[in-house]
Image (cartoon, rainbow, N blue to C red):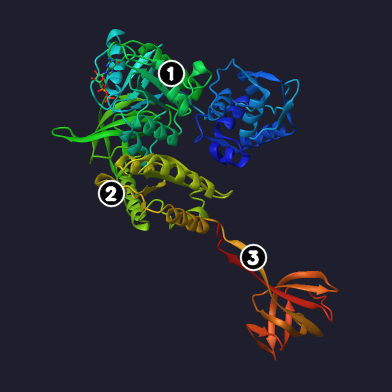
């Protein structure tokens, strides 16, 4: 049994980052809110948090931000975020007054009082060593470059690629195959060579998580722009850590401090301000800062503890694909686990084949490819789609069969439901445990309404179903909104905006529900209704009648109570309580219900009947049999 970090955080009433830092205290490192941990580790965290929350924490009159975070047992950046929300921009070493500390604590759901500053010492359960799967070895990180148009994504990817030539790396020149590797400190890093979140999200929509780390390019002369925000949403929705490349630092109008301020406002708090976001100044055109960026990527990769097992069966994901004259279907594949070898039979999405040749990013033919290696693959029967996965098969026949089964299954799934998620079928999905939250992408005409809708939707959340707004912004519903929704099993809500043509096509293709509204009330009402269906029906007991026992008959099948219905009714399916002197002496069901030796379904007030109570033979004259039913009531919010 494993449990998602974000789910456990919800259960414990803490933020994911608080939980991740608690896990860190236990010696368990996780990548992000979407990572999973095992049940034993979850139990340890529950204990740790329970012991921490017991008692009020003492905080000195004036306290340094970092110490305050320590005392509370949370990450300093959470304290800073809370302070920012209060309009206070504080560095790690800054002192805050108790009144401020108190407000921060309240925001974070902690109780504090003035004192020595000692936390109630939590009984730290011993951390269990993290059990890496057998055969698992460190593997290179896979990095995607995201950011606003013209901020320098392509230039940055070029600059990184060029380090190969300057470093004199063997076969320095890269062929464009959709991904490449560079070596830094003797360790490879894999870059996806298609910048931007369109490809990133298209892959996620197909269920493939390729990227371990996102490099967010922000031009120092331009700052955070709409697509920067989009990119952040996408990376966050994928639970991928973000490293900021502060590009164009060479430009005279570059203003790094302003960008850092903007980053802090979207909760990417720079490390030098005590947050945990690495911000690396670079110039893609001049090639400065690139080494530093690569080192930071490796640092982040170490934290993520990325592993794969080279000896396992090969698994991979398609990054790009095309049909080439003379070569047939060509797919750029990123091997994710195991080692892919020439001659292997493989299934890729709904096609299959035998690995005829593999070409690496230097244009060299290779015999095998291990984890995080990008290669061009020849030998498939058909062109697979980006985001489709490769698995191994024992031979061609099995590969063909598996590919066919996959195609059939996909067709069935497509027919089975018109949308991956829709307001109508949320209830069923929830009941089947498929979803626990309603993810929503909101597009609206003005910022004010976007914010109002976000807040109102947030307020609809209940303990059982959370409404999670994964993106809320101004503008028409665009294709990228639909793709984000597809990747996150979300619905798209357009408020007073148009749905672009490409978005309509994408919604059909990706089976995403797009709903349009002009009146906030109607929007909220629809969501509320869907959530009422979303919630498990409440069980309500209804007393339906009382019978008085007047005479007892012993029968071979047990004791039958000759009774008189005083009020209401009793049915064959009723549940009953036997009451004696006002006290319940038995509760159970009805075994038989008869009138004049005839089995009947129901007896109503004013009639006599024979009732046999299931499993109860010590019934007595004058007992009252109370009949009741359990009704399932759909809840309203
Ligand atoms: P993309 O749309 O994000 O891929 O951006 P490009 O890489 O195409 O860059 C957009 C423009 O910014 C191009 O004219 C680049 O030459 C320029 N550019 C990119 N990086 C830098 C940089 O570090 N410094 C300067 N001065 N210009 C840059």
Inter-mark Cα distance, 2 to 3: 43 Å
Most extreme residue toward the right is 581
Q: Quadrant of residue 292?
A: top left
**Left or right of 260, for residue 274:** right
* Local secondary structure at mark 1: strand
Quadrant occupied by the C terminus: bottom right
Inter-mark Cα distance, 3 to 1: 56 Å
**Left or right of 581, for residue 303:** left
Kindly identify which residue carries mark 2.
504
Q: Earlier in the sequence, mark 1 or mark 2?
A: 1
Kindly identify which residue carries mark 3.
540
Kindly identify which residue carries mark 1.
279
Marks 1/2 in contact by CB < 8 Å: the verdict is no
Marks 2/3 in contact by CB < 8 Å: the verdict is no
- Please state which of residues 411 and 194 is positioned toward the viewer in this rendering: 194
Task: Find residue 622 and report its horizontal and vertical position in percent.
Answer: 84, 81
Q: Quadrant of ligand 1?
A: top left
Q: Can residue 142 be seen in the rendering of this structure?
A: yes
Residue for point 66% across, 19% down? 63
Residue for point 67% across, 85% down? 604
- Please state which of residues 134 and 177 is positioned toward the viewer in this rendering: 177
Q: Can residue 391 be seen in the rendering of this structure?
A: no
Q: Earlier in the sequence, mark 3 or mark 1?
A: 1
Task: Find residue 384 and report its horizontal and vertical position in percent.
Answer: 27, 40
Label 1 environment density (alpha carbons within 10 Å; few <14, some 14–19, many ≥20): many
Q: CB of residue at label 3: within 8 Å of ligand 1?
A: no
Residue for point 64% across, 35% down? 109
Task: Find residue 414 and report its horizontal and vertical position in percent.
Answer: 34, 54
Task: Find residue 433 and report its horizontal and vertical position in percent.
Answer: 52, 51
């Amino acid at each position: 049994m494993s449990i998602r970090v974000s789910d456990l955080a919800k259960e414990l009433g803490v933020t994911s980052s608080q939980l991740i830092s608690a896990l860190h205290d236990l010696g368990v490192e996780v990548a992000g809110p979407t990572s999973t941990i095992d049940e034993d580790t979850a139990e340890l965290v529950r204990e740790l948090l329970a012991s921490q929350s017991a008692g009020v924490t003492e905080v000195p009159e004036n306290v340094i931000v970092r110490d305050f975070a320590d005392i509370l047992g949370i990450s300093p950046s959470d304290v800073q975020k809370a302070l920012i929300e209060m309009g206070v921009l504080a560095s790690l070493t800054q002192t805050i007054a108790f009144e401020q500390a108190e407000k921060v604590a309240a925001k974070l759901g902690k109780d504090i009082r003035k004192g020595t500053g000692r936390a109630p010492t939590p009984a730290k359960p011993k951390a269990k060593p993290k059990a890496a799967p057998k055969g698992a070895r460190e593997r290179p990180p896979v990095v995607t470059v995201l950011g606003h148009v013209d901020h320098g994504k392509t230039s940055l990817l070029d600059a990184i690629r060029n380090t190969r030539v300057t470093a004199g790396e063997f076969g320095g020149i890269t062929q464009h195959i959709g991904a490449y590797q560079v070596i830094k400190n003797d360790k490879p890093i894999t870059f996806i060579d298609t910048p931007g979140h369109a490809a990133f999200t298209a892959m996620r929509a197909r269920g493939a998580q390729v990227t371990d780390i996102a490099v967010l390019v922000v031009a120092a002369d331009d700052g955070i722009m709409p697509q920067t925000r989009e990119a952040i949403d996408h990376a966050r929705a994928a639970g991928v850590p973000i490293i900021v490349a502060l590009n164009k630092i060479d430009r005279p109008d570059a203003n790094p401090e302003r960008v850092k301020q903007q980053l802090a406002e979207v909760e990417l708090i720079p490390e030098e301000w005590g947050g945990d976001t690495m911000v690396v100044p670079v110039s893609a055109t001049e090639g400065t800062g690139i080494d530093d960026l690569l080192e930071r990527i490796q640092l982040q990769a170490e934290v993520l503890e990325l592993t794969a097992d080279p000896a396992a069966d090969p698994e991979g994901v398609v990054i790009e694909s095309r049909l080439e004259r003379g070569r047939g279907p060509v797919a750029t594949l990123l091997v994710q686990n195991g080692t892919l070898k020439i001659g292997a039979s493989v299934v890729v999405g709904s096609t299959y084949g035998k690995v005829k040749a593999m070409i690496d990013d230097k244009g060299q033919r290779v015999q095998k490819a291990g984890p995080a290696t990008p290669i061009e693959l020849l030998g498939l029967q058909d062109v697979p789609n980006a985001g489709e996965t490769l698995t191994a098969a024992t031979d061609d026949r099995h590969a063909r069969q598996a590919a066919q089964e996959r195609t059939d299954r996909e067709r069935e799934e497509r027919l089975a439901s018109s949308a991956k998620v829709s307001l109508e079928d949320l209830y069923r999905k929830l009941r089947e445990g498929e979803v626990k939250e309603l993810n929503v992408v909101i597009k609206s005409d003005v910022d004010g309404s976007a914010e109002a809708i976000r807040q109102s939707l947030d307020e609809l959340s209940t303990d059982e179903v959370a409404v999670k707004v994964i993106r809320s912004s101004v503008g028409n519903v665009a294709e990228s909104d639909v793709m984000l929704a597809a990747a996150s099993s979300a619905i798209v809500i357009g408020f007073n905006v148009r749905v672009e043509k490409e978005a309509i096509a994408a919604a059909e293709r990706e089976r995403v529900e797009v709903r349009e509204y002009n009146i906030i009330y109607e929007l909220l009402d629809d969501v509320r209704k869907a959530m009422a269906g979303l919630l498990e029906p409440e069980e309500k007991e209804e007393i339906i009648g009382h019978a008085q026992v007047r005479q007892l008959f012993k029968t071979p099948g047990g004791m039958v109570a000759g009774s008189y219905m005083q009020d209401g009714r009793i049915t064959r399916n009723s549940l009953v309580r036997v009451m004696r002197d006002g006290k319940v002496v038995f509760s159970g069901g009805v075994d038989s219900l008869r009138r004049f030796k005839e089995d009947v379904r129901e007896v109503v007030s004013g009639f006599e009947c024979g009732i046999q109570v299931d499993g109860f033979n010590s019934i007595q004259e004058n007992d009252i049999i109370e009949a009741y039913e359990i009704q399932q009531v759909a809840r309203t919010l």
